[in-house]
Each structure stands twice: as structure tokens, then as C-alpha cells.
Amino acid sequence: MPSAVLPQIPHYEPAPATKESLDYAALTIVDLSKAKTPQERAELSVQVRDAMMSQGFFYVVNHGLTPTQNARIFDIADVPFAHVTDEEKRQYAGNIKATGSYQGYKLRQYWHIDAGVHDQLEHYNLNRDVTKKAHPRALRPLLPEIEAWARFNHLEVLHPILRLLALGMELPEDAFVNQHGYDAAGETYVRFMKYYPRSEEEEEKTKNVWLKGHTDFGTVTILWSQPVAALQILSPDGNWRWVRHIDNALVINAGDAMEFLSGGFYKATIHRVVQPPADQRGYTRVGAFYFAMTDDNVKLVPHADSPVLQRHGIKRRCEDADAPTMEQWRRGRTSAYGQTDLKRAENGVEEEVINGVIVKHYN
């Protein structure tokens, strides 16, 4: 991260941690500082493999940024929302449905949640190459920090995790890394997000669900933990459980593309966002994410040379000949999300078909 004198911006004060007793998921905590040597990575890969297969989420600690640097990122994350006018936001809104890209703003009420209720969150998305698009005035002095943060996420967090995931499948360490070039053509991006409180009427109509249960469409999602409790994961026993906030920790999960590449060994994990507990209602919820995808031209077929897959079999979501590229998959998922009429299946599950593959939403 840049260490020179930084531009002055207002401090974002997050909500106090909840004091309510919630049913938290028991997630593994992975110490990334213990992944320096081949022996350490071999040992850590077992922990990551088991965490990914049991819960699909895990924490990362000791990743290399200090709490002060972490706080600075959340100060930056609030800038595109609190310090950009609505008029300027509209000027930088992404043409999401037409382009299949999130670059720019997703404005509030773009997605349909349920029962005629639309979302109350906005986010701003920047490709890891921050020069690809123009940005609002308030963000321009901060672009060197954002680019450095993207590079940090990619090279110091994503690549080490990809090595551990590859070792968990008994693949060469760089099997997944080689498909995630930092300078290659692709849409891996930084997302800053802000949720706003909703009306009681909206909460009632959606049964307090802010974002339906879904899977991410990339390979690995890096979420920088923040204190407002709202994220829940669908546990193996079928119950939704809360994700606990840990200061200066990362929350990691796999998406569709990793499920494709791993032949179903690492499943895309189902999660949702709900109304926060009573003592945190009324606060905004600012998030900082790094959504990783392979290079655009990578065909999402399983690494069939994995000895693990050769022993246990491959679970394909489509035939290899029909598998989409990363670009096709992310464009299809991005364009359709929150914009299509979903087909209701069993037990509150809703479905749509993207590139010939069934995509499920959990209501």
C-alpha cells in the first residue's frame, strides 16, 4: 500500500458490534502468514480444503495489512456514496444489463428482491486496472491507493489461496494461479458497497431478506470483515447461520467458476444478506470486496488431471464441450441478476438458465 502522504478524506465510523446472541457459523480461521514455505502450504492446504468442503467459507488472518490500513480502506469505500452527488452517480452508472459488466455504479433499486420490493444498496465497481474507466471526482485522488489495494488482494491474498486450493486437489501449486493473471484481460474487480436501512413495509414483504440466497459467479470472493451483522450462509444442515465479524479479518468463499474448474470438489457457496439485528438497525453497512475471476479466455472445464478428481469423480454442471468461458459466464450472470423472471422450484428455490446451466436462487 502507498506510504506517502495520503489525501485527506472523512473518516467512516462503522456501527458498534452487535451484542445480540446470534447463531453463528463455526468457520475455520486460516493464518495466511503460515503459507511461506512448501511444507507450511502443504499443511495449510488440508485446513483450507476441509473448510471449503464443510462450510464453503473461511476466515483469513495475518494477511499483511494493519488495522490502520484496513480502516483507511473503509474510509475510501464510503467516498463514492457519501461524497458523490446523486447526479454524478447517475453519470457514472454502469450499463449492467447491456454490457454484462458491473464497472461503475449499481444504483439503488436496480435489483428486484421479492414481492415488488427493490434493493436499497448501491455499489461502485472498479476493474483492477483502474484506468479502464473514468471515475467520479472525489475518487480520482484515491485511485493509486485503490489500485495498490487491488494488487495486494490479487497477489498477496488471492494467489496464496489459489495455491492452497490447488494443493487440496493434489494439483501443481500454480494450476489456478496461472489462470488468474493480474495483467491479463479480465473483469476481476474491486467493489465498494453500501446498504441503507429499509422501511418496515419492505422488511415485511421480503421477510427481512435484503439479498436472496445466491452463489457468486467468479472463482474466489474476498470480503473484508465489517461489524454490521447481515451476512448469512446456508449451512450443510439446511439452516442459515450468521457470519461473525472479526477485526481485520477476511471472509473467503468460492463461486461458480471455482466449482466448474474443480469439477464440483469446491462448491460455489450459498449466502444471503438479511436485516441486521435490532441493535444495529438504522446504521448503514459499508463493504469492501475483491471479486476474483479467471482470465476472460479461460474455458471453465474441470482440472481432470487432479488425482483427487480421478479418485472421487467429477461433478459437472455441463458437458465440457458446452462449458462457457469466464467472459461468457460473468456476462451472462451479471446481465441477468435481479432483472429476469425466475422460475419457482421446490422449497423456495428459484431458477434461471444462464449459458445452458441452471442457476439457483434461495428465497
Image: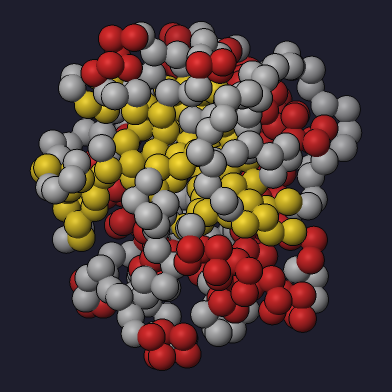
Residue 22 in percent (x, y) is at: 53, 33
Identify which residue, 190 or 263, lies in the foreground: 263
Residue in the image at 46% along x and 16% along y: 196
Residue in the image at 74% along x and 60% along y: 32
Residue in the image at 73% along x and 51% along y: 61
Quadrant assignment, res 319: bottom left
Residue 332 in percent (x, y) is at: 26, 49
* Quarter placement of the N terminus: top right
Q: Is residue 305 above or below residue 40?
A: below
Res. 134 in view: no
Identify which residue, 55 or 88, lies in the foreground: 55
Residue 333 in percent (x, y) is at: 29, 48
Direction from residue 140 to residue 236 in the image, left or right: left
Outermost residue toward the right in this view:
4
Identify which residue, 213 or 175, lies in the foreground: 213
Residue in the image at 56% along x and 15% along y: 279
Direction from residue 158 to residue 104 in the image, left or right: left
* Quarter placement of the C terminus: top left
Res. 35 in view: yes
